[in-house]
Image (cartoon, rainbow, N blue to C red):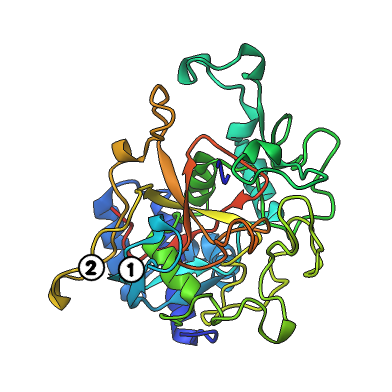
Amino acid sequence: MPIVARRGVCVATEGGLRALLLRRAQLRQLAAREACDKLRLQSSRRSVATSTQKAFSEESESLSSDMVYIPGGAFRMGSDRHYPEEAPSHRVSVDGFWMDRTPVTNRQFRAFVEATGHVTFAEIPPDPKDYPGALPHMLRAGSLVFDPPSHAVDLSDWSQWWRFKFGATWRKPYGDGSSIKGLDDHPVVHVACRDAEAYAAWAGKELPTEAEWEFAARGGLDDAELAWGDELTPGGKHMANTWQGEFPHENTKADGFARTSPVRTYPPNGYGLYDMIGNVWEWTTDFWSTRHPADAARACCVPLNPRGGPEAESYDPCQPRIKIPRKVLKGGSHLCAPNYCRRYRPAARHAEPVDTSTSHVGFRCVLRATPAS
């Protein structure tokens, strides 16, 4: 299926984020790694020029208020109790990093497009050379849109509820005639991996690794099933935007939403992050692998800042003629339901081709002291 700690952050930590953002902004002007190291040293000695501070202080303040410091540490990644691709559960460790409090919104993505003129993948007609055997009339710009049937269908056939709609883009999430008017605070959708990466580069950030994303989503609850505990709706309270009813034809909207929701609608997790579960799936940097690696034999060998498998192993074996890499999505979406896709959990993961965009996939960014290799 083409799926398509803590809440309080200390002043010193936010100050460190502002300093780091300032240095990242300077890096846009100085490409050399040596210049980057020099600026970091100067910043640590409080010798950054006043003129540079004025140039980037507004951006730094804005970004720091929208990010949370995740302290890093060791945790058990994956799960042995659900889908096979989540196994085996294994111990890993990640360094500390900053993460966006919410998925990137339509308002934020619009600012990026207006500043750069970026054209998303969904707005570009496919190149026939990349899709051997494709029907010519389908080689038009568009994106996948959830289109619920009116009756129960075979749950093994995702084409019963997904439609490739010509003209569907982040501006027109449901196709021609739709718009994002009134949806400024909803997560941006119909963004392929390269669109998310372009936004991150423009913002001076990066996409998270799968390990970083899962560690942050757990919010300090290492052994819990969900990001907030072990019960989906504790005390009858909805903790995330997921599906209620029989998917895909019956949506009771008990949580108040049929599709996406404003990004701060539900409670944050233990780290103060919103919508880590549900609403939209989120891109990570890791190439897809069908299973996690085994647990380290000794405590000394627990992987630090692990990455996914090699690109060549991420290709879809069901489409051997098409060599398009797939990357890991995390978090589930508003379409995840108990009777179909129980992936509203931190350990859940799904493969997504990097050229694919849908109406339920978005992203958020991270900021590291040292860029991921």
Where residue 168 sits, quadrant-wise, is top right
Q: Which residue is mark 1?
A: 89
- Gap in Å between the C-alphas at discs 1 and 2? 7 Å
Q: Which residue is mark 2?
A: 295
Specify whether residue 266 is in view. Answer: yes
User: Who is closer to the viewer here, 81 or 204?
Assistant: 81
Q: Is residue 137 above or below residue 100?
A: above
* Image quadrant in which the N terminus is located: top right
Percent of width and height locating residue 32: 29, 47
Which residue lies at the image location 53% right of the left edge and 47% below the top edge? 196
Percent of width and height locating residue 318: 43, 31
Where residue 171 sits, quadrant-wise, is top right
Count of all numbered marks drawn on residues in the image:
2
Classify mark 2: residues with Cα within 10 Å, few (<14), some (14-19) or many (20+): some
Percent of width and height locating residue 161: 71, 41
Q: Mark 1 or 2 closer to N-term?
A: 1
Q: Which mark is residue 283?
A: none
